[in-house]
Every structure is written in C-alpha cells, then in structure tokens.
Image (cartoon, rainbow, N blue to C red):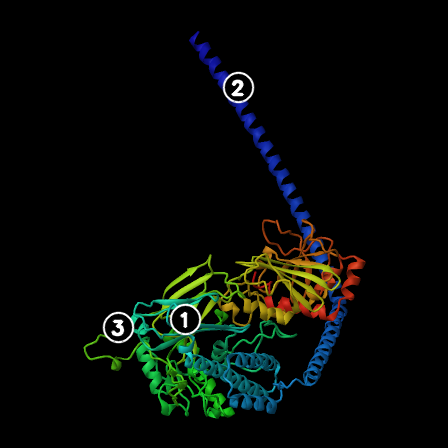
Amino acid sequence: MSFLYVANKNSQGRKLNKAQKAKQQQEEEERRLQEEEEARLQAAREEQERLARERKEQELQRLELKDRERRADELDELRHLLEENHTAVTKWKADAVEKAKWERYMQCDGTPDPAVEQDINTYISLWRDDPDVNITVVLKQCNLALQLMEELEGLLRDVTDHQEGQKYQEALINLQELIHSKHLLTTEEILKRASANIDTETGNMQTVVRDDNVTLCIWANLKKNPRFKGLTFEGVGMGFELPKQLAVSSIAVRNFHTRYDHLSLLARMAHLRINTPSYRSLAGGEEADIVAPELEETNVEGEVKDDNTTQQQKAEEEGFEGTGRKSAASQQSGNSAPPAEGRGSQIQTHIEALGGFSLPAAEGDLTALSEQLSLTDCSERFKVVDMMQYTPLGGVFYYEVFHLPPQAHHINGWEIRQLLDTGLQFFHYPMEKSNLDDNEVLICPPVGVSVTLPESVVFLEAPQVARWDAAVKQWRMDGITDVSYEEAEAKISFKMDSFQAFVLMQETYANFPFQSWELRPLGQDSALFTINGALIDLSITIQGNQCMLQTEREVGLAHLVGRWMSGSALQRAMLNAGINIFVNEHTDKYVSSCSKDPLTEHAAYEQMALFASACAFSWSKWNSKCGAEHLVMQVCENLGPTPVPKGSWSLYLLGAQRSQMLEITEKSEAFSPDHNPGSEFHSTFIHMLQDNMSTDGIARTRESNYLFVDTVQSLLCAARPLMYS
C-alpha cells in the first residue's frame, strides 16, 4: 500500500509541474504578444508623431515662406503709416511753435520774451535796480519772473544749439538769484519794522504772507523770554523750536516755503546737457519734456566734515556767510546781506548764499561750474542724495535765523533809526566759542522744525527729509534727528544741528514695478491707459492729443485729477505731484525688470499706438518667461467703450523678425512658443492683428488721427510697461 501511495503522489506531482509549466508558457506567450503589441503601438505612435512633426515642419515652412513673400510689402506698409504720422506730427508741432511765437510777440504787455537775450537781460537789469521792497509788489514781480523761468526751462529742453542753451541757462540762474535776493530784501524790510507790529500776547512780532507760490513766515524775538520754546504759525502748518541760547538772543527766524524748487535745479545744473535723453527713453518721437541730468565724474577738492561748526568755519574761510558765500560787495561788511540802499549790481543774492557760487560770466566759467561736483565722490564722503533714486516734492522749506535789525525809536514825534550798511545779517548757529566767556561750556542743542505736507503732492510712503549742503550744492539726509511723521495729520517734525533749507523726498520709483497694465479703446481716437502700480493704481484717458488723469486717491491730486492737458504736461504734473509711472535711462539701476530688446519694444509701442482705437492690449504673465528677444501681451479687438469680456483675450508673441498668435492661454501651466493652429506668421504686429479683426475694426485704425497715435505712443514709451511689469 505504501508503495502505491508514493507512486500516486509522484504522478500527481509530475502532472502539477506539467500544468505549472504550461501556465508559465502561456503567460510568457501572452507577455510576448503584449510586448509585441505595445512595440507595434509605440512604433505607430512614433510614426504618427514623426508624420505630425513633418506636417508641422511643412506647415511652418509654408507659413514662413508665405511670411517671407509678403514681408517686404508689410514692412513698406508699416513704414508708410509711421512716416505719414511722423510727418504730420512734425508739421503740426512746427506750426504750433510758430503760432506760440506769434502770440508771444503780439502780447504787447510789457513782459520780455525770454527767447530774446536782449529783452531778458534788460528786464533783469531793470528789476535788479528797482528799489521797491514792498512785499505785495515784490511777490507779483517774482511771480512774473517764475513764469519767465518756466518759459526758459521749456526753451532749454527743446534747444539743440549749445550756445543758445548756455544763454538760457545763464538767464535762468540770473532770475533765480534775483528772486531769492528780492525775498531777502523784503524780509529785511519787514524786520526793520518789527517793533511796530508787536503781538500783544507774546511781546514778539510774527507775520505770515502767502500767495500761490510762496508762504513767508517771520518771527522777531523782541521779548527775549528764556521760557520761549517755539512757535507754530497758525493756518500754514509751519513751526519751529528754539534752544534757550536763541530764545534770549536778538534774532529773527524765517520759515519760508517756496512751492518751486530752485535748489534741486541748481544741483542738476552742473550736469545739465543739451537735449538730454528724456523720460520717454526709447529711440524716436517726441521727448517727454522732463530734464534728466547727465551724471559726470569730476573731482571735488577737499572733504567736508560732518561737524557743522567745522563745516561752517570752512565755508567762512572760502567766503561764505552763514550758510552761503559772500559776494565781492559784501566781503568788507562781515556776515551780511546787501543793504537796502545802493544795491545796484553788487547785490549778494540769496541763491549765492545757498549755492555757494556766483553767476559765471563766460562759457569757460560755465564749464568750470560743471566741474565743481562729483556725485560719485560726494555720495561716498557726504551721503549725498542720489537725485535719480529720490525726487524732491512740494518745493523747498528755508529755515533761517538772522540778527534782528535795529528797531526805530520814537522821540517827540520823531522816528530815529540806526542805519547799517551791512544789511540783514545771518546769525551763526551753532554759536562760535569766541562769543562765550572762557569758563562757559559750548553746548548748542539742535533746533526743531515742523511742517504740514504740501497739499499738492502725494507721498506714497513716509517722506524722507533732506537738508541742503551749500558746500557741495547737494541734498543730504544725514544730520537730521528725532524725525516724527504723523500720517493722519500729514505732519512731519524733526531736528537739525543748524538752520538749513530742507526738502521732503520720495523714492522716484516707489510705484514700480507695475503689477499689471491695460490699454483699451473708448472710441475713435480715444483710449484708456490703466496702470496698477506697486502702491497706487491710476488711469489716463486719452482723447486726441489731450490726456486726463483718473485715480481713486484724491488727497493731494485735486488740482490734477479730471483736468485735460497735453501728454508732456501731464507727465511733468504727475512727477511734481509724486505720482511717477515714467522711466528714463537710469531706471533699470533701481527697478527690477524683465530685460527686453529696446528696438523690439519700441516697435511694439509704435504699432500698439496705430491700433489703439480698435484693439485692447494688456499685461501677460508670460512676458517675463519668453526671453529678452521676445514680448508677450494679451490682445483683443474691442470697438466699444466697455471693458474686454473675460475669455476674449488672445496671446501674441512679438519678435524682431516675426509676430504670431500663441496656442497657450494666460491660464496655461507652462510657457510654450508654439503658434496657434490655423493662424499665420507676419513680419509686423499690426498685420498679425488684422488676421483676426473685423472690417470695421481695421477701418477704424486707418482713420486714427496722427495726434492721437503720437500721444499714445509717447505715453507707452514713457512708461515702458512691457519692461517694467
């Protein structure tokens, strides 16, 4: 039995092994068949892909061949459109200049023509010799001079002849000097009669005079109360704090706010070059009429120490008085301004005191002036403000202290006044040790000042304070302590070691880079350019050659929002108001950008302007992913004034040689340069757009007015949204 059991068991095992082998063979056969099927399918797929690539390559070759065949015609058509517009714009501008000259000639109101050297020089000479120091009369005269300066600045922007530019620059400096000297003389006249206008509550004299361009606040210390701490001039938002040494001194304090800024212009003047590349900063077309200084590397001899006393002593050794330099006429009379009588051509102007130089008399002197300053050296030694990185806003605040002039005495109906030939004298602070007893310790606490932010500007961030350094004629941010900014009250206060002019500054490119942008039509020759900036959003409505700013923020912009003006005027007004969306050749040093080929970018703006009446253009996230040689933007035909419906946008890729519609969308996961199937290649952007435009849309673009096209192009080239977003 045992033998039979073992035999049966072995037989069953052999059968089981045979079945397992058969199963394994079957599985192997199935795998082989499956692998063969997969290989066949893979080969079929590869064949299909190969055929697809071949078809795609053939299609690309066909499209490229077709593009090459019509390339010359498309480029000629685009060139014709651009040249036609450029010729019309150039003629219109030339006619406008001639018309303005004729209107200026026909004014016949006694005001000089700043373009005529003899007229402006005669006006300056007559005004310099005018003895009238009445504040009302002088302010009117200064307002006229400011208008002439504005005209001169316009002439200087447009001039191409170097010698003519030097004449305009010299006239500018002369007018600046006269304006400041006249303000100083009227201040002296007011202080001479301080005792006749005593405030009964404080025993001192305080007065405020203001007009559209200046606010003059004067305080005379007649009481010499040691408990006096400071004063706030009601209604104008300016005030000051004095240490005890000054509270008991015979002094006068002047807080003087000019809504214009001659000191920053003075700082730039040494580096001004004729026809500077403008804020448009791309080749061709109208400049944005904004002067951007050319930085030069020159040499500044010597160094100025941070210690204010040492700096002031050095200034005195070089002929400075107080915070400025003496003229030849005043060197014999100590630290003084010109007397009221016998001023003539010997007036030592206030801008000399602030700027530390006299007006050059010849072209060689102007050249020498331009070599006085090296911003590179100064920035290392003196912490000089980089005028490309920061922009002064709201004008200049002059914070000055003077010796109080002798007051009149009334005896038996007679007015007796001591007459000095020294004029108004600057008071030295920090005080010199020679004025103290040997056993006294020289302690000169800082002086305080507070101002309300100007109503005509917007500070997107807390303002920076910079003081004027007369020695190097530049702004500095050191030497300012205890800064307190009250945003709700729009007030800033701080302390300085001495009395100096100061400005409030903001980073020039605080609103960069742009988060997004859009240019869409509102109708024939009308469009809306929207910028969503880093800190503020705004829109510019374009109608013909006029522009109007729109923004939800009204504080500080009431004088600007909703007003129609030319594109260049709007750019200047926005910059002066602290709303900057415009760039220049220095911007890339301070703002991160997607580097783009400037010629390709400029060509895009030219063609966008041609079609701005019928097509909407918008920011695309893929623009930063497509490389420096290409641009990507969203485009859609939009003939109505309403916003572009969602999902209507198409992506376009622009290059130096070709434009195409992309297959990807704004929501795609990755960038791909593949063109949209069914679309073609074109050598120009406008012909690429025409493939998907209606007949009415194309007709509207051909009817666009040349002034509208030029205005749109100027704004696009000034903001460069394709690079700085």
Amino acid carrying mark 1 in the image: Asp
Q: Which residue is mark 3?
A: 443
Q: Between disc 1 and disc 2, whose residue precedes?
A: 2
Nearer to us of marks 3 and 1 is 1
Q: Residue furthest top?
A: 1
Q: Give how far apart the Cα atoms at labels 3 and 2 are.
A: 116 Å
Residue 183 x, y percent position in the rendering: 48, 80
Residue 263 numbered tag: none
How crowded pointer 3 is (Cα within 10 Å; few <14, some 14-19, many 20+) is rated as: few
Query: Counting other residues with Cα less than 10 Å from the Cα at mark 2, is it few (<14), some (14-19), or many (20 or more)?
Result: few
Question: How far is the residue under mark 3 from the one under mark 1?
Answer: 31 Å
Residue 488 position in % (x across, y down):
47, 56
* Crowd rating for badge 1 (residues with CA inside 10 Å; few <14, some 14–19, many 20+): some
Residue 461 appears in view: yes
**Disc 1 to disc 2, how far (Cα)?**
129 Å
Mark 3 vs 2, N-terminal side: 2
The circle on residue 199 is 1
What number of labels is visible? 3
Marks 1 and 3: in contact by CB < 8 Å? Answer: no
**Residue identified by numbered label 2:** 15
Q: Type of residue at label 3?
A: Ile
Q: Determine the secondary structure under disc 2.
A: helix
